[in-house]
Amino acid sequence: MRILSCFALLLLTACHSETAMNQEIATAEQDVAQGGRGLAKLNPAPRQAYELVLKIQDAPGPINLVEAVAQYDVTNEAQCGRIQPETETAGRITSQEPVELRRISEGEYRGTVYLDRMQDEDYYGRGVCHWEFSGASAVLKATGAEGETRFTAFLESPAFTKGEPLTRYYANAVYPRAASLPDYRAGGEAAPGDYKPELRQALFSVQLSARQVTL
């Protein structure tokens, strides 16, 4: 009877732990849906610091909304992620962390990005998830009003860590908004020559670059 009682207690404890974990995961998924971090945790003492530099040139008007985020992805989600019941596979695990930008001068902003911003941890009871920095992105809008064009740029990790700049060119024609496309996302082009000849003289650019800094 004592053995059976202990066995029943173990089952009860296991069921309680599983239920608690499922509730935690459900709460985390709701948080992610609302723009939160979910189960992901930040490294309390990041050390791999880089300065992100954003420069705007020849803008056709004011750019009053300038934001940046650093993207991180788990590299071993198949081994550590939550198994989706529908597919029996682990879903992608990613996080975009805001980068606080400082206005240095007209058209120039800087902020600090940490490559090791996320904390490796066993989030789902299947093993430790390992995070990796994927790159830094920026979004710019004329005033930030609804319906305005979102001018975006993304500097991938290899170029970011090597100090290689990224420059994107955007057509003035869609500033501050595209006539028939509200909330239009403009990813820009790599060179003015990528546009039609009639647009090449009416472009502005955004450059992203980074350099390692010592803390």
Image (spheres, helix red, strand yellow):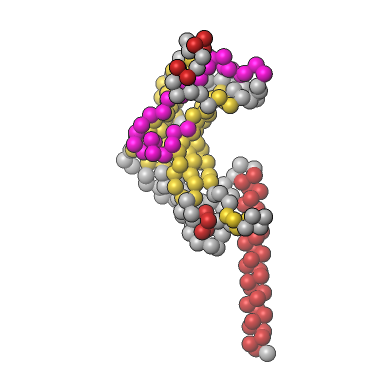
**Left or right of 134 on screen, residue 25:** right
Instruction: Judge whether residue 75 can be spotted in this image.
Output: yes
The quadrant of the image that shows the C terminus is: top left
**Left or right of 3 on screen, residue 190:** left
Q: Taking 97 as reference, is 182 above or below it?
A: above
Q: Residue at x 53, y 44 (%)?
A: 95
Q: What x and y, as percent, mark residue 63?
A: 52, 20
Magenta stretch bounds: 154-180
Q: Residue at x 66, y 64 (%)?
A: 19
Q: What x and y, as percent, mark residue 102?
A: 44, 29
**Left or right of 162 on screen, residue 178:** right
Q: Residue at x 48, y 23 (%)?
A: 189
Of all residues, the one furthest to the left in this rendering is 214
Instruction: Judge whether residue 206 can be spotted in this image.
Output: no
Give whichever of 175, 79 is nearer the camera.
79
Q: What x and y, as percent, mark residue 162?
A: 34, 36
Of all residues, the one furthest to the bottom in this rendering is 1
Residue 156 belongs to magenta span: yes
Q: What x and y, as percent, mark residue 80?
A: 52, 58
Q: Residue at x 41, y 44 (%)?
A: 115
